[in-house]
Image (cartoon, helix red, strand yellow):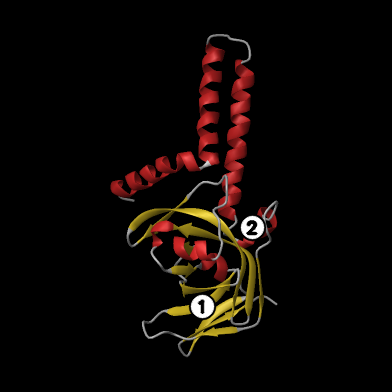
């Protein structure tokens, strides 16, 4: 990774601190750990307790971050559904024709609102533009770390959200995780965290065929 990319990600993370409870909690826990270490060196009573509380807080934050990231991996659904909606995709085979521009596009109802998506097998996450998220009533999930996305326009900060209902063709999905990317433009992307929850997908005679799990 180039130095400029690292600096961009660092700058975005710093700007996100006031909006992220986990980032603030991490800073507070690290500060407590430093205070506890100083207290121990100076033999001040309670130093070990303060440092232990800091360690427990950091472990809890790391666990939360792991669960946040793991939500996008269907193999870990049994672990990550604790306290969050189950991510399900049901229905029948759906065929998406190849568009004139060489991409696969579809119009889905997101919480009942028609929303146009680019189906992108190279995208890890399903992503919404700020405009589409607002129209569908999607809200950023509170308390999580922001997600950094690499786009053609550079690194952008995105907020986690949960899609209550997404329907197109013969497919109905509920509880799917996604991100809201204000700098994404007007394009919404249906990424691999959605496609990998299908039984399978393939291209036949130029058409993209999606098959939900039975």
User: How far across and down, in percent of the image, does residue 212 sit?
Assistant: 64, 77
| Among the two numbered marks 2 and 1 on one chain, the one whose residue lies closer to the N terminus | 2
Give the position of the C terminus as an image quadrant: bottom right
Q: Nearer the viewer, residue 109 or 152?
A: 109
Relative side of 5 to 95, left or right: left
Up the image or down, 122 lies above or below 12; here it is below
State the residue at coordinates (60%, 16%). 47
Q: Nearer the viewer, residue 2 or 18?
A: 18
Up the image or down, 132 lies above or below 1; here it is below
- The answer to whether residue 146 of the structure is visible from this angle is yes
User: How far across and down, in percent of the image, does residue 194 sit?
Assistant: 56, 68
- The answer to whether residue 126 of the structure is visible from this angle is no
Q: Which residue is disc 1 drawn over? A: 107
State the residue at coordinates (54%, 53%). 140
Mark linked to residue 76 = 2
* Label 2 crowd bin: few (<14), some (14–19), many (20+), radius 10 Å: few
Relative side of 162 to 102, left or right: right
């Amino acid at each position: 990774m180039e130095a400029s990319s690292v600096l961009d990600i660092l700058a975005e993370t710093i700007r996100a601190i006031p909006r992220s409870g986990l980032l603030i909690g991490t800073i507070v826990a690290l500060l407590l750990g430093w205070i506890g270490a100083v207290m121990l060196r100076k033999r001040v009573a309670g130093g070990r307790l303060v440092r232990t509380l800091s360690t427990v807080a950091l472990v809890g934050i790391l666990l939360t971050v792991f669960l946040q990231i793991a939500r996008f991996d269907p193999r870990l659904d049994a672990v990550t559904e604790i306290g969050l909606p189950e991510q399900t995709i049901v229905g029948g085979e759906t065929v998406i024709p190849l568009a004139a521009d060489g991409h696969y596009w579809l119009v889905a109802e997101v919480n009942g609102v028609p929303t146009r998506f680019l189906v992108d097998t190279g995208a890890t996450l399903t992503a919404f533009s700020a405009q589409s998220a607002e129209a569908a009533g999607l809200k950023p999930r509170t308390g999580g770390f922001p997600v950094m996305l690499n786009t053609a326009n550079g690194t952008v900060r995105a907020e986690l959200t949960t899609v209550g209902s997404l329907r197109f063709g013969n497919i109905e999905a509920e509880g799917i995780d996604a991100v809201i990317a204000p700098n994404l433009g007007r394009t919404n992307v249906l990424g691999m965290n959605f496609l990998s929850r299908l039984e399978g997908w393939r291209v036949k005679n130029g058409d993209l065929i999606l098959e939900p799990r039975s």
